[in-house]
Image (tube, grey):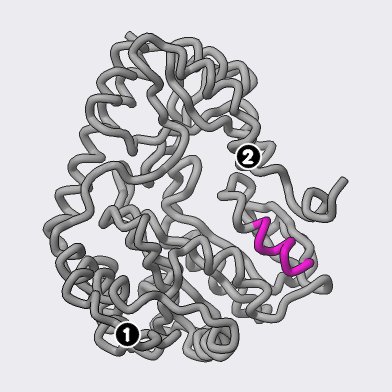
Amino acid sequence: MSQVSARFPDFPWDTIAAAKRRAAEHPDGIVDLSIGTPVDPTPAVARQALVEAADAPGYPTVLGPTPVRQAAVDWLARRAGVVGLEADQVLLTIGSKELIANLPVQLGLGPDDLVVVPELAYPTYEVGARYAGCEVLAADSLTGIGPRTPALVYLNSPANPHGQVLGVDHLRTVVDWARDRGTLVVSDECYLEFGWDAEPVSVLHPDVNGGSFDGLLAVHSTSKRSNLAGYRGGFVAGDRAVVAELLAVRKHLGFMLPTPVQHAVAAALGDDEHADHQVEVYRTRRAALHRAFTSAGFRVDHSEGSLYLWVTRDEPCRDTLDWLAERGILVAPGDFYGSAGSRHVRVSVMAADERVEAAVARLA
């Protein structure tokens, strides 16, 4: 066994290669609902900003220009009700996955530190913690953590893979518990603008944190709201001291978002019209897939938010994977995200309208 394979779990998508090949054999081609990647056009406002900033011969700064970070502050105030945040509490990141993967290392965590991740979770939380040599515990409740004091607790709402939205009371309880112990709370909020059956709330909202950002970080991305996944533009915001610590480390390591991308991110965050349109596009696709899977005998659990349906036929998830692949539909098996997902599959609603229609027809 190589050192890499000993330190990290298998890359999950490598394990569904056979199902992907089977789905691709369908006469009308594969309907790939396994990966949450945007397929709609990047908004013109972002592309224009990228072009206008294309003459960028000098190095960008790691922190990013104040107007770009202020765009993030203004967006959080306008769309998430966050008050009192300032531009020096925002740090640009090369997408959100990069930040999550490197965060424990950049915070100086190691083998003596415990990192808590959700029981069903995006694998990068665990991978980043193991990269730093930390101990990892999967727990959704504070009682599940036990007597130890974690260095870091991850939250994810609306969640990937199952779309659960954590309410204000739950978030406030976690924040109060963590502050009593000096634990950093990192909330991955990349799907914050995608709430269907519940209203998502940021950990930076005053109803959650009492008006203080101490001990809190929120991670955001323009990939989903603005179809900027190829630009890799995100940011982290919150505790001023922690942001400053990350900045100091990242200056040495050279984690810089390219100047044209910085301006595209600012333009995208400043424009709500395209984001509102994208929400409605996903709402329509989600509704069609929800009806189709329900009519085909599946049960949809959680899925109050985010861009996925968490569905089950009450059988092992790999059996469901194969059943759908026989019909030319590829999904993500729930065991990608933890043993608690072993009887579910994740269905992405991020597919072109024509492919969504094909999936609906095949499930009818």
Which quadrant is the N terminus positioned in?
A: top right
- Is the residue 305 above or below the residue 220 in the image? above
Q: Which residue is mark 1?
A: 57
Helix, strand or loop at label 1? It is: loop
Which stretch appears magenta? 126-133
Q: Which residue is mark 2?
A: 12
**Residue at screen point 31% across, 49% down:** 195
**Residue at screen point 28% across, 53% down:** 227
Q: Residue furthest right?
A: 1
Based on the picture, tell me whether residue 14 belongs to the magenta stretch. no
**215 or 243, nearer to the observer:** 243
Q: Earlier in the sequence, mark 1 or mark 2?
A: 2
In the image, is 276 to the left or to the right of 19? left
**251 or 280, nearer to the observer:** 251
How packed mark 2 is, by other alpha carbons closer than 10 Å (few <14, some 14-19, many 20 or more), is: some
* Residue type pointed to by label 2: Pro
Where residue 180 appears, as percent x and y from the top left, is 64, 79
* Residue type pointed to by label 1: Pro
How packed mark 1 is, by other alpha carbons closer than 10 Å (few <14, some 14-19, many 20 or more), is: few
- Is the residue 67 above or below the residue 124 in the image? below
**314 or 33, nearer to the observer:** 33
